[in-house]
Amino acid sequence: MVVEVAYARAWDPEARAAWGPVSAGEARERDEAGQPYVVVYREPGREAPLEVRLVSWRDHYVGLWVYDAQGRRTDDLDLRLLDDPARLLRRYSVAWNYTGPEMAEFDRECPRVTVDLLPDGRGRRTEESRGDAGGSYCASPGLREDERWMDRPAFGEWPLLSAGTHGLTEPPVFEVVEPTGEGGHGDPPAGCWRPPRPARPGRIGELFRPGVRVTDGYHPEQTVVEPCRAGTLRVPSGLLAVSGPDNCDEGPAITVPVPPGEYVLDEARVRYTYHCEWRNEEVTTTAPTAVRVRVSETPAASWEMALGADDDLRLFIEDQISGFDTDGATGCFADAGAFEPLIGLYERGLVKGEPDLDGYEDLADGSMFMQRTWDTATGGELVAFATCGDGTYPVWVGRCADGRVVAVVVLVEGMPQLLPEP
């Protein structure tokens, strides 16, 4: 079987077409420079490609999309180049098992299998059935070393990885198709395939600017009000800890270097009106959206997600988050230099309920900040705050133009959508 191989700068998934065709020589140059490019494999006479591969070594990423004869994506394979330049980790894969040729691509009723792998051997295989018998089943993938990793082929020597999916029993004969027209100029369109990105912060600073209009998707319009000052936090060690106080046996989940000092604690709030069925009238109320350690009065020019000690951005899939975990809908800001004694006081005061405990107090001001502890030996403090549920909460670090940390924020209920200025 003859398989045509074409190179391009990008792939448009909506049009199922290459964007910016390039020659094999130019694709090789892009490969050596780490710049992204795609390889399209087609069977002559078949409209849909057999598979498309996006290579971007600067992002440590190779992606593979497999298509069936109806032009539906059936497999999505995410490969990562880590410390060993000779092999690739099969980081993440999704397989859609369409029940018939009439089923639409990514139909919500389509069963699928997801495999999520990490370099240390951990992983999870999830089978999702849809329709009336919908449900999911999770288990260890149980893969061998050679099934989790693959050798990194040289440029132009990649096999057709989807050969088995397409029922090919003999190795195909590859024919390179050189472009005949002029390639695209500038950056590829926004909708083109790109390497996965971790979760992005959004315009967090707007949640602390009175007058900004937002919506949480349930209430159509909310207005940001003046942040509520909830006291201060002393961080004499110069290392701010952010963690779930109920999940910190191995220390704080996140630490952020800050100048030693005492910093203001803020709570961002929105005001909105809704119809109260119980009272049968319109009611105006406020609700929290975020808590903040304000390190500086300088506005943040950029925001980034804080990473834990074991986090590796080379492994992040699309919209993946890092942060602290909580099983008790609680987080905390604390001085990392005194974290262990501060957590000990928190547990003694809140969990064990020791009366008249020196170094512990409940905060009864009605804000999301609930408890405070302080270490008399170092002067470090901890303040616990409520979240709106369990799970993992990202920690967002705001920096000014010269890179200094000016704020550390936790969104207690996700990022609202900003509405246009009136």
Image: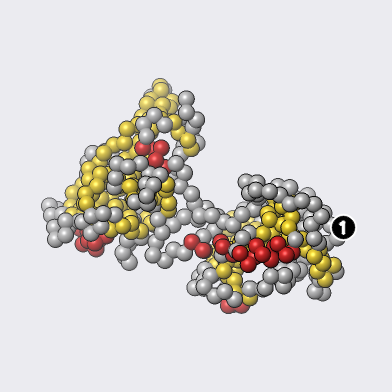
Residue at x-position 73% and y-position 47%: 15
Between residues 113 and 194, which one lies in front from this camera angle?
194
In what quadrant of the picture does the N terminus appear? Answer: bottom right
* Near-viewer residue (1 or 57): 57
- At 54% from the left and 55% from the top, the residue drawn is 197
323 relative to 118 in the view: left or right: left
Q: Decide if residue 362 is on the left or right side of residue 9.
A: left
Quick one: which residue is furthest to the bottom in this view?
A: 145
Q: Looking at the picture, which amino acid does disc 1 mark?
A: Gly
146 vs 70, left or right, is left
The x and y percentages for residue 14 are 70, 47
Where is residue 337 drawn, in percent x and y? 24, 62
Residue at 36% x, 31% y: name it: 210
Query: Quadrant location of residue 65?
Result: bottom right
In this rendering, is residue 208 above or below 125? above
Taking the spot 70% from the left edge, 62% from the top edge, the residue there is 26
- Is 153 above or below relative to 202? below
**Total number of numbered discs in the rendering:** 1
Name the residue beneath numbered marker 1: 45
